[in-house]
Image: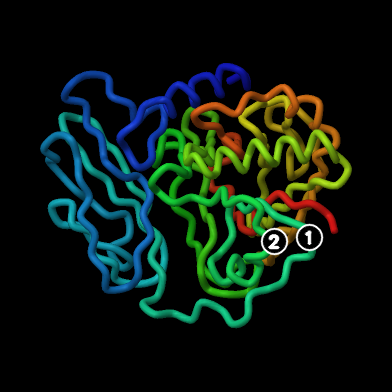
Amino acid sequence: MKANKFFAAAMAALAFVGFSACNPQNQPTGGDALELTETAIQMKVGETHQLQANVTVETWTSSNEAVATVNAGLVTAKAEGNAIISATAKGVTKTCVVAVKKDGGQQGGEGAKISAKRIWPIVLDGVTAEANASLIAGDLRVDDEQNHLYVWASGETYKAGDGTGKNYFGNTEGYVSLTVVAPDGWSGLGFNIAKAESLAAISALKEAIVANPDKIFLHLGMKSTTPGNHQFYTFGTAATSFAIGTATIEAGEVIGDFERDGAWHGFDVPMASFASTIASVEVGADINILCALSGNAAGAQLNMDAIYFYEKE
């Protein structure tokens, strides 16, 4: 699938409002098409959460009942880990990824200090964010209200990863963990920003990149135990594409690879090469500040954390 068609389809899906997370295959095809109000939630062990659907669900199932069970849409968190809750009605199945953390689990000690003049976090745990609060120029993190992580074709292109172990900064607050399914030859996700304060922050970030392109970088932490290539796009355009791995998936250049040893590895991507493209981006009612593709290598892990733009000191 070509990048321009992929992004056109993705952005068209994101224009639909009223659901906590959605994707092209999760858009209504008729008045009685099954939809879930959420396709990604976080819970602590012992908590319950009621999933809602717009039609009567015939069957609810959990991919991992040791982690989370479901009864008539009521999800009960049993143990730390990830599970996919599936709802089926009239032959249509939609999914919700459930990430469970330990009840009252240690959230890390003192947060790690980030070396930067200012930062714009996309994925950053609360402990680290608090420790670096004075550096945050604008918060682009998911809030499941107006800023969302959309897994396109949820449950069909990615499934929940194991999400175990400490995050990039060494605490237990979790990280983005997915595994490629990709039966149709592609897999993708986007961090879509629609919150007014966050959009204003993106506009300010854009101005900073244009004014000082050599000083702005995108930090990205990754870990895996499987081979696989991953393509990333910033500011909702394929013209800012780069790949991590051994080859590109669609366009752009490979900026590097990392040892698949299960340990965290960090990348600092200079925005200088993308500045002219970013200068022409219009920040409207919403924008995909970061997108990722993982191709069709079923089983490949996409574990990400510590994702933030930063200005060098």
Circle 2 crowding by C-alpha within 10 Å: few under 14, some 14–19, many from 20: many
**Residue bearing the label numbered 1:** 116
Q: Is residue 23 left or right of residue 198?
A: left
Q: Amino acid type of disc 1?
A: Ala
Q: Nearer the viewer, residue 21 or 70?
A: 21
Quadrant position of the N terminus in the picture: top right
Nearest to the eye among marks 2 and 1: give it.
2
| Labels 2 and 1 touching (C-beta < 8 A) | yes
Q: Residue at x 73, y 60 (%)?
A: 265
Picture quadrant where residue 235 is located: top right
Circle 1 crowding by C-alpha within 10 Å: few under 14, some 14–19, many from 20: some
Residue 166, x across and y down, in percent: 58, 72
Q: Residue at x 50, y 36 (%)?
A: 182
Residue 205, x across and y down, in percent: 70, 41
Q: Nearer the viewer, residue 251 or 235?
A: 235
Q: Is residue 113 above or below residue 218?
A: below
Q: Residue at x 49, y 25 (%)?
A: 11
Picture quadrant where residue 17 is located: top left
- Say whether disc 2 or disc 1 marks the residue closer to the N-terminus: 1
Residue 29, x across and y down, in percent: 27, 19
Q: Nearer the viewer, residue 171 or 87?
A: 171
Q: Secondary structure at mark 2?
A: helix
Q: Secondary structure at mark 1?
A: loop
Q: Is residue 312 left or right of residue 128?
A: right
Quadrant position of the C terminus in the picture: bottom right
Q: Nearer the viewer, residue 313 or 188?
A: 313
**Residue bearing the label numbered 2:** 135
Residue 79, x across and y down, in percent: 34, 72
What numbered label is drawn on residue 229? none
Number of dots carrying numbers: 2
Q: CA distance from mark 2 to mark 1?
A: 7 Å
